[in-house]
Every structure is written in structure tokens, then in C-alpha cells.
Amino acid sequence: MRTRFAPSPNGYLHMGHALSAVLAHDMARAADGEFHLRIEDIDAGRSRPEFVEAILADLTWLGLTWDAEPVFQSARLESYEAAAGQLRDMGLLYPCSCTRSEIRAATHKEGLEGPVYPGTCRDGKADLSKQHGWRLDMARAAEIAGPLHWHDGYAGEVKADPQAFGDVILLRKDAPASYHLAATLDDAADGMTYIVRGMDLFTATHIHRLLQTLLDLPVPAYYHHALLTGEDGRKLSKSEDAPSLTELRLDAADGRQLADDLRSGIFPAGISRDSP
Ligand code: GLU
């Protein structure tokens, strides 16, 4: 059993992150396995070293321990480029120079992660004199991969349906890779066997499952836990009710008690569990 917590250092952690980290940590400890940390800092414009420091301090405050030096995605860009090259050689990636507003104007079809890309740049139609990213040719990719499933400790056996997302971006024009490509590659490179994360990332797993088969990577099991929300019903990152873990830590709150409460399903005032 090897699990990980993989925060993006573009803000302070909130209670939902604490729940993910505690669950992943405990899953590894209960099986005498390993718990790792991965800092998802490929977005250089938004990642800040002070958030990395706060994340490590918050996790220690919660009483969590990890079994290897934290891995930083910014140090692994070559492996993302190599995998993209493999997909390009398979004829599965194409350049795309569309802006967000051009895409919005050209489609009304909403996918699981926003508008489904209308295929404007497919068949070599991108304007390569403009900044461009690279998209997956989803229809071809899904055909090569065939039927896909994953085991989810929360939802049971799930049939992956990546086609619902359309041609997703795998190399962003403003960052060296997309979350989907980087996270899938790193989970495989670090030998993760159980991916524990919030239900908000359930949809991403459809794409990750496809990439695993295209790139011949091992397939871990998943556990997408229910999300915590503020009493206003809003996501914790957006909710007014939710203090960050760093605020609580600096207020001298008891982090180990908080972790134990989360384990027992007791949430601090103002926070509730949003059953999926
Ligand atoms: N970095 C992602 C986030 O903070 C989580 C990635 C994952 O667990 O796969 O939302």
C-alpha cells in the first residue's frame, strides 16, 4: 500500500485538504505501507515557496508523518515532455492555438470540466505563429484504449467515460504540462497503489484511467471521499466560514485533535459533509 497527498502550493490548505491527507496517511499506516507527499507546483505563476512551507508545517501540526522526501513536479518536467512525445508519436496529440473565449464562442456543449472543445484546431489547423498547447485526440485515444474501468473504494467498480470530456489539453500553453498528465505520470513513477482524494477529482479519474492505458502505466485503486463544505454549502476554498489550517495552527489550535475529529467524522462548527 502506498498513498500520497498532492497539494498545489497556490494557497493555504483548508479542512478538506486535512481530511484527504489524514485519510491517505491512515490508509498507508493501517496497511504498514508508505505515505508520500507530492507538491504540484507546475503552475509557476501561482505556486509560492511560502505555501510549500505552510503545507509541510500544517501536516506536521496534524500529526502526520511521511516516508520519503517530498517530490516537486517542477523537477520532473522532462518526464512529462517525454510522455507527451510518446503520445505525439502515436498520432494522439495535436497543437491548439484557441483562446478560452474562441472556444466558448464555438461550442454550446458542456462537458464535465467546462465546454467540450469543438475541434477547431484538429487536423493541423492550429495557428502555430500563436502561443499553443497540445490536445488529446479523444476519439482516437478512446478507440485505441478500448473499454476502461477502475476500482473505487467509495463508488465501487466504475466504467471510465473519458469521451465525455472531449479533446482535453495535455500540455498547457501557459504551463509545462496539465494536471492530468503530470499527476498520472507521477502516481505511476512513484508506485502509488491507492489514490485517495476528494470527490471533486472523481471526473479527472476518467482521463487519468485513459492515460494509464495509452502510456502503459500500472492502474492504482482509487478512493474519492465526500467533500466538506462550509455551512453556506459552498466549497471550503470558496466558503467564508472556513479558516485555513495555517490560521488555526497559528491560533494555537490542537492539530492532532482536529485530525482525530476528522477521523471520527466530527467536523468543526461551520463545516459539514456534503454527501456525493
Ligand atoms: N493538486 C490537486 C489539488 O490540490 C490534487 C491532485 C490529486 O490528488 O490528484 O487539488
Image: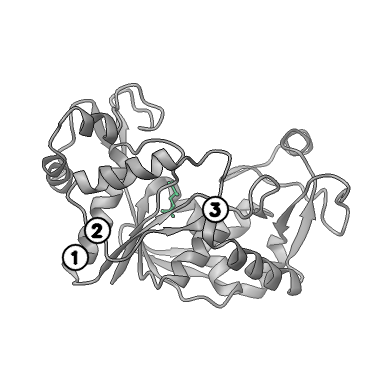
CB under 8 Å between callouts 3 and 1?
A: no
Q: In which quarter of the image is the C terminus?
A: top left
Mark 2: amino acid? His
Does ligand 1 reach within 8 Å of label 1's beta carbon? Answer: no
Residue found at x 80% / y 46%: 97
Q: Residue 179 carries which label?
A: 3
Color scheme of the displayed model: one colour
Q: Which mark is residue 25?
A: 2
Q: Which of 244 and 98 is in front in this view?
A: 244
Q: Residue 29 carries which label?
A: 1
- In the image, is residue 266 above or below residue 219? above
Does ligand 1 reach within 8 Å of label 3's beta carbon? Answer: yes
- List x then y, in percent, for residue 113: 57, 44
The mark nearer the N terminus, 2 or 3, is 2
Task: Give the Cα distance between marks 3 and 1.
Answer: 27 Å
Residue found at x 57% / y 67%: 211
CB under 8 Å between callouts 1 and 2?
A: yes
The quadrant holding residue 245 is: top left
Task: Give the Cα distance between marks 1 and 2.
Answer: 6 Å
- List x then y, in percent, for residue 235: 38, 32
Left or right, 121 with respect to 111, comes to right
Mark 3: amino acid? Tyr
Does ligand 1 reach within 8 Å of label 2's beta carbon? Answer: no
